[in-house]
Image: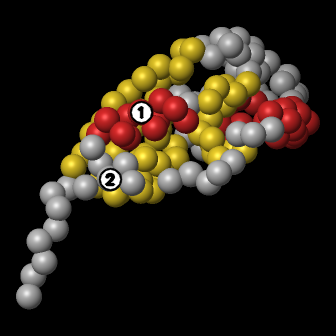
Amino acid sequence: MSRATPAEHVAQNAFTVHTRGRGFSEITDKVMQLVSASGVQTGIVNVFTTHTSCSLLISENADPAVRSDLERWFTRAVPDGDSIFEHDAEGPDDMPAHVRAILTGVSLTLPVHGGKPHLGTWQGIYLWEHRVDPHQRKVMVTVFGH
């Protein structure tokens, strides 16, 4: 006996985040809007940035001290201008930004449940700019499901 399954659906959209330089930009609401507009009720959403010196992460969204603590920890772990780095074509924050992005990642995949990304109560989605100067960062959101 075969069961009919709802048709699969894919939606893909991009948006730009204008950063102020090193720090966090919350993108939860934008991702929520795009998932909702896709019509997918159950499935997955992939969020991807096309850059090598920023990253995406899920972090606590209630206390900004969490993000400040992360920034201070990374400043200690991967300092700008460290003599260990040869690659500094765009300044002393160039290679440290690449290391930070590699360690934290440029994509996220989340379940979609009830037409929205399934996040915990205190979770938010952030683009983390690792360069000191402001940048425009492209984010691609792909939603798959039914």
Rendered location of residue 1, percent (x, y): 8, 88
Q: Residues within 10 Å of mark 2 (few under 14, many from 20)?
A: some
Q: Where is residue 59 shown, x and y percent of the image?
A: 69, 44
Q: Residue at x 16, y 68 (%)?
A: 5
Distance of mark 1 from mark 2, alpha carbons?
A: 13 Å
Q: Residue at x 80, y 33 (%)?
A: 64
Q: Which residue is mark 1?
A: 33
Q: What's the residue at 68%, 13% (across, down)?
A: 20
Q: Using the image as rendered, state which of residue 13 and residue 93 is in the foreground.
A: 13
**Looking at the image, residue 7 lies above or below residue 10:** below
Quarter the C terminus occupies: bottom left
Query: The residue tagged with tag 1: helix, strand or loop?
Result: helix
User: Could one spot residue 83 in this view of the protein?
Assistant: yes
**What is the number of the mark on residue 60?**
none
Q: Is residue 51 above or below residue 102?
A: above
* Picture quadrant where residue 13 is located: top left
Residue corresponding to mark 2: 41
